[in-house]
Image (spheres, rainbow, N blue to C red):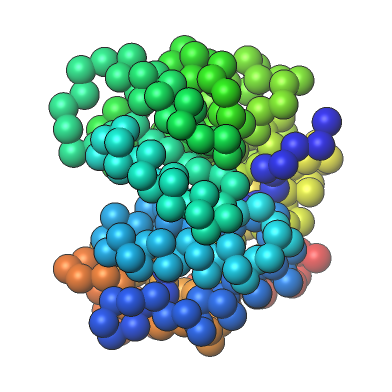
Amino acid sequence: MEKKYYGVIPPIITPVDEHENVDEEGYRKLLDYCIKGGLHGIFVAGSNGETMALTQKERDHAIKITLEQTKGKVPVMAGVMDTSTRRVIENIKRLEQMGGTCAVITSIFYDRHTSQDETVRHFEKISKETNIDLMIYNIPMFTGLKLTPETIFKISQFDHVVGLKDSSGDFKNFMKCLTYFEGKDFAVLQGTTAYAMPSMLLGADGFVPSIAPLFPELFVKAYEAGRDKKTDLAMRYDLLLRETSKILGMTKNATAANKFALSLLGFTDKRVIYPQDTILPEEEKAIAKKTKEIQAQYEAFK
């Protein structure tokens, strides 16, 4: 069964200029690099893309650029998460007007969560207001609500709901989802890189690593090893993937670490949106060194 959403789909950064508007030139170059590197899709306007820090205008601008630059070569998953059902639907309507075909939706946030059922209702109403693909995004660290497998199963029954990006870090629940959706036309994507290879070997359709644009070939080869159930090879790649994840923990702010690391490609600036913590000079040196070490390890591994 060939699914639409699979493989390595990075939650792409949003490069910004000194006015915190999207750096269109740099962003287009980064997108081209991702596609040329063989990555299987792009997730724009996610947490790593600082989507809630962007103005609505610039958030839409980032999505529009992504759709234009990818030109249908790879699927684009666009974040439309917001604080109410109505706001999400409005975001989806703008996405539709731009030609977008997949909306990534979380539970609402900055509100009191009273039940799992509120998120079921959230998706049920949204599914009646659009015909584009809808992706469930389970990311409790930012929403304050961890979706249970049972809630995910209920939501998956609604029209247009095509997959799950799970960033809960709950591997036991992720395995329950893999079992439930086995053999179904429903994409199950691992959002925690530390669990990428075990998830692939157990049947996941792909994973969503933020640092993948820095090492596209490494991540694609790791995915292929997991997809093909080459256990020994996949677990060797797992060691390398875990090394890449260390980059994100080398500053207070994982987004700042990610943006600096990707700036080493020469396309974009390291700038994060105010008032986030920025990266220190000594941290930059450590990340640059770590990046070279990982690339050398991968070359030796090949």
| Residue 301 appears in the rendering | yes
| Residue 277 appears in the rendering | no
Residue at x-position 42% and y-position 80%: 23
121, above or below 232, in the image = above
**Residue toward you, 77 or 228:** 77
Quadrant of the frame with the N terminus: top right
**Residue toward you, 65 or 246:** 65
Residue at x-position 36% and y-position 19%: 121
Residue at x-position 39% and y-position 75%: 22
Q: Quadrant of residue 66?
A: bottom right
**Residue toward you, 239 or 127:** 127
Residue at x-position 65% and y-position 74%: 32
Q: How many discs mark residues in the rendered view? A: 0
23, above or below 140, in the image = below
Q: Is residue 242 left or right of residue 283?
A: right
Quadrant of the frame with the C terminus: bottom right
Residue 159 position, x and y percent, is 57, 23
269, above or below 161, in the image = below
Residue 169 position, x and y percent, is 44, 34
Q: Quadrant of residue 82?
A: top left
**Residue toward you, 199 or 243:** 199
Q: Quadrant of residue 270?
A: bottom left
Q: Is residue 85 left or right of residue 179?
A: left
